[in-house]
Amino acid sequence: MGVAYAYNDLICFLAVVEHGQLSRAAGALQLSQPAVTKIIRRLEDALGVPLFQRGAHGVTLTADGQLFLNPARKLVRQHEDTLRVAADIQAKRIGLLRVGLTLATSTSSVPQAIATLIRMRPGLRVKLEVDKSDRLLEALEDGSLDLIVVPTYMDQDVSSAYMVIGSDELSVAARLSHPLSAAVQQRKGGLRLAQTREYGWALPSRDTKARRHIEQQYQLQGLAPPTAVMEIQQNMDAVVDIVSRTDLLCFVPAYVLRQASGRLQRLRVEHLALQRNWLLMHRPHSPWTSLMKDLRDLLVR
């Protein structure tokens, strides 16, 4: 006969794991520390093993506690999914929709679709999170987001459930009066990659697909790697400002070029343009609420 676990007891267990101290977990849960201690002991008694090791600086999971952690998280997600579906049915499409976007996809059709949905459902509340793709994927997996829209490249494997809702292209850009501008006009097929060698770059970090793509193309042409004078993180406004005042080259998505059309120009360079798709993703096997379906339908119609 299996052991039954109360949802609130699992929430308490996960809070202790997150905070590493019974007192901090109690504060986060708005419970007393003795109440949290009692709940943890109840779980340990039910399992017949200790879940935490007590120390001078807090608590850490035992080996058995580590084994219990992922199933506990899964049970909590399943319970919350069930509550959300029940609330969605009861409220008739009035509820909370949690959506994650990257900087790039925040300029796509998704904000327009969310605005339309808010007009359609006056009682709707939206939690909108803008972050990097890997962090959004983690939030989707742990159940703190319902849907995310992230860019992905043509040869990239995707494990979550998804549908393609759009696409764009990354290409080389430079200031309007860049020395290579005349060379672009003279050669209809675009610049040869070798013509960019003497210029420095503003490039994303080495762990990104865009950076690997550029370095691979240089290598295939027998050229030394591009000189990364500046490494790009999230602040594209600062990148545009710097590139527009220097001879640096950058590799940016189409939305950046549109926004900076009076400051940057696209340079057609052989082999360097890179296509990517926008993916609407949800957690596999999680239920589609009516609000999620409404947003999906607005994006794919």
Image (spheres, rainbow, N blue to C red):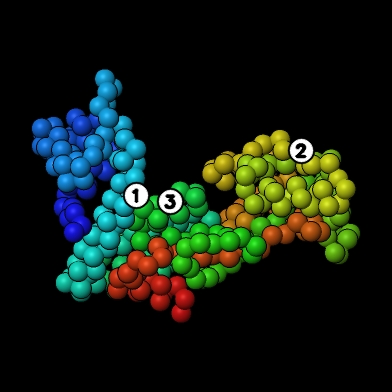
Marking on residue 28: none
Nearer the viewer's eye, disc 2 or disc 3?
A: 3
Of marks 2 and 1, which one's residue comes earlier in the chain? 1
Report the amino acid beneath label 3: Glu
Residue 227 got which mark?
A: 2
Q: Position of residue 128 (x, y in %)?
A: 36, 55
Q: Residues within 10 Å of mark 3 (few under 14, many from 20)?
A: few
The residue sitting at 70% across, 49% down in the picture is 212
Of label 1 and label 3, which has the lower sequence position? 1
Figure quadrant of residue 74: bottom left
Quadrant location of the N terminus in the rendered image: bottom left
**In terms of depth relative to the viewer, which is nearer, 58 or 52?**
52
Q: Are marks 1 and 3 in contact (CB under 8 Å)?
A: no
Percent x, y for residue 162?
48, 68
Element under disc 3: helix
Q: Are marks 2 and 1 in contact (CB under 8 Å)?
A: no
Q: Amino acid at mark 2?
A: Thr
Local crowd at mark 2 within 10 Å, few (<14), some, or many (≥20)? some
Res. 278 image quadrant: bottom right
- Evaluate whether residue 170 shows in this view: yes
Q: Which residue in the structure is indicated by mark 3? A: 138
Instruction: Specify few, some or many for label 1: CA neighbours under 10 Å numbering under 14, 14-19, or 20 or more.
Output: few
Q: Nearer the viewer, mark 2 or mark 1?
A: 1
Residue linked to disc 1: 70
- How far apart are the alpha carbons under marks 2 and 1? 44 Å
Point 64% across, 52% down: residue: 209
Identity of the residue furthest to the front in this view: 1
- Tell me whether the residue at label 2 lies in contact with that at label 3, contact meaning CB atoms closer than 8 angstroms: no
Name above or below for residue 110 compared with residue 132.
below
**What residue appears at the point 50 percent right and 52 percent down from the top-left corner?**
133
Q: Give x and y (percent) for residue 259.
A: 58, 55
Instruction: Inspect the image, locate mark 1, and give the three-letter code of the amino acid beneath it.
Output: Asn
